[in-house]
Amino acid sequence: TQLLEQSPQFLSIQEGENLTVYCNSSSVFSSLQWYRQEPGEGPVLLVTVVTGGEVKKLKRLTFQFGDARKDSSLHITAAQPGDTGLYLCAGASAMNYGGSQGNLIFGKGTKLSVKP
Amino acid sequence: KAGVTQTPRYLIKTRGQQVTLSCSPISGHRSVSWYQQTPGQGLQFLFEYFSETQRNKGNFPGRFSGRQFSNSRSEMNVSTLELGDSALYLCASSLIRWGNNEQFFGPGTRLTVL
């Protein structure tokens, strides 16, 4: 069974601080996605990383895919209250074939609270 | 472009009843996946449909079923509801593109079983 472990589970910080969220697995993924979810809403896709070692930046958010495609990290610089939410990583199995899209494996999420 | 829509947004049922949830994918998306989200287990994959066929199924009992129509809209059904079925049910749609597993989620249906 493939698992994605996210850490930390909870994070409460002050506005302006930096933070990193980790997503680890013993399995290889063909791609990894990061989502943010707000209460009562569905997850919103932030980024997809596909290549081992890939780094993508989205304003103050930096996403990295591990060289072996088993882990990923999300770094937020100068966090703002608007960054508050549940951050989820999701991996697509390297065993998916036939173009199957559905079986994303999700971590349990990191609940981030940024206080003004 | 309209996003993924799910109806209803909220449902309250009692044990033993059955429920049907509906999902309309983004126009042009032919793959629809369903997930169950609970505080304890997080997001868990239920099943995926493409061209009216179930292509993948997660580890859920047979009480959970679904279908997809020719216009890509999808429904999921839960029969003989149990208290543990209380959850946020999320639908996600995606384009079929090799190596691209990006999924776009709807707002979810919050199901409460009493």
Image (cartoon, coloured by chain):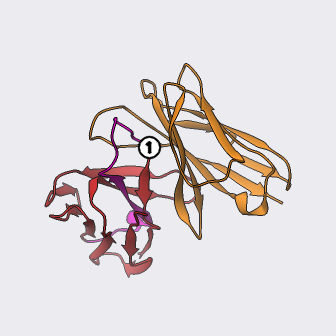
Chain colours: A red, B orange
Question: Hey, which quadrant is residue A81 in on the image?
Answer: bottom left
Quarter of the figure with the C terminus of chain B:
bottom right
Instruction: Mark yes or no: residue A7 visible.
Output: yes
Q: Amino acid at mark 1?
A: Gly
Vertical relation: A40 (above or below) B76: below
State which region is magenta.
Answer: A78-101
Q: Horizontal placement of B7 versus A103: left or right? A: right
Nearest the camera: B55 or A72?
Answer: B55
Q: Position of residue A21 (x, y in %)?
A: 32, 72
Vertical relation: A38 (above or below) B71: below
Chain identifier of the residue bearing label 1 in the image: A
What residue lies at 47% left-to-right and 67% top-to-bottom?
A108
Q: Secondary structure at mark 1?
A: loop
Q: How many marks?
A: 1
Q: Horizontal placement of A72 versus B108: left or right? A: left
Question: Hey, which quadrant is residue B101 in on the image?
Answer: top left
Q: Position of residue A44 (x, y in %)?
A: 42, 50
What residue lies at 80% left-to-right and 44% top-to-bottom?
B18
What residue lies at 66% left-to-right and 41% top-to-bottom?
B65
Quarter of the figure with the N terminus of chain B:
top left
Q: Horizontal placement of A41 versus B100: left or right? A: right
Residue hosting label 1:
A102
Residue A93 inside the magenta-drawn segment: yes
Q: Position of residue A39 (x, y in %)?
A: 56, 60
What residue lies at 26% left-to-right and 68% top-to-bottom?
A73
Question: Hey, which quadrant is residue B31 in on the image?
Answer: top left
Instruction: Mark yes or no: residue B3 visible.
Output: no
